[in-house]
Amino acid sequence: MNAEKQVRVVFSAEDIRRGVERVAREVQALFGTRDEVLVLAVLNGGLWFAADLLRLLPANFRLETMRVSSYGAGRESCGTLKWLTPMPQVQGRRVLVLDDLADTGLTLREICRNLAYAGAAEVKCAVAVDKAGRRNCDLAPDFAALHTGPGYLVGYGMDADGKYRNLPCIGVLED
């Protein structure tokens, strides 16, 4: 029987709220309020960030969701992207990809690359948390609500074997 691990809080719900509000201002300043922007939330982890962010953006931001995987059964991205839902129609559209975490950057890089190849006019990405210290590719998120160092994060959409996503804070699993 597995015992639940302890979670050390790294970002409180208030820290998250302030970061999301800042990203909303930055995103709106870049995209404006008139032309449609297709917002693609990466499921499952990006759902929390997408819901909070979209509540702060104007009506020209249109939400769709997508499911991709680059992790397989482990906790490390292998960099090979598998689309679990059909790729959305992006030809000629401005696109904002939302995800929970930019860790190695491989998943976001491949998503953005695929959307650009599919003809998106512009592709930007925003994440709840950027862990730039582990980046092993040339992609950096255009927007990040929070920045952190090492540690396996859970909460606010991030999970460990399907657990902890629903935490209102973001924390590191302690052994």
Image (tube, helix red, strand yellow):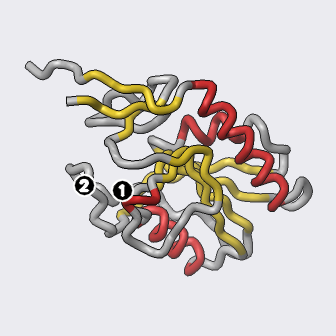
Q: Amino acid at mark 1?
A: Ser
Residue 77 numbered mark, or none: none
Q: Position of residue 69 (x, y in %)?
A: 36, 56
Residue placed at 33% from the left, 68% from the top? 79
Residue where numbered disc 2 is placed: 72
Instruction: Give the crowd class for mark 1: few <14, some 14-19, many >=20 residues within 10 Å.
Output: some
Q: Secondary structure at mark 1?
A: strand
- In the displayed structure, does residue 92 sit left or right of residue 86? right
Q: Pointers 2 and 1 in contact (CB under 8 A)?
A: yes
Q: Nearer the viewer, residue 40 or 136?
A: 136
In this view of the protein, can residue 145 be seen by the observer?
yes
Residue placed at 43% from the left, 63% from the top? 105
Q: Nearer the viewer, residue 103 or 118?
A: 103
Q: Nearer the viewer, residue 82 or 47?
A: 47
Q: Quadrant of residue 94?
A: bottom right
In this view of the protein, can residue 40 be seen by the observer?
no
Q: Quadrant of residue 173?
A: top left
Q: Amino acid at mark 2?
A: Gly
Residue 117 vertical position relative to residue 165 in the rendered view, above or below: below
- Which quadrant holds the N terminus? top left
Mark-to-mark CA distance, 2 and 1: 7 Å
- In the displayed structure, does residue 142 sit left or right of residue 54? left
Q: Position of residue 120 (x, y in %)?
A: 66, 74
Residue placed at 53% from the left, 50% from the top? 99
Residue where numbered disc 1 is placed: 69
Residue placed at 61% from the left, 60% from the top? 125
Q: Position of residue 57 (x, y in %)?
A: 79, 43
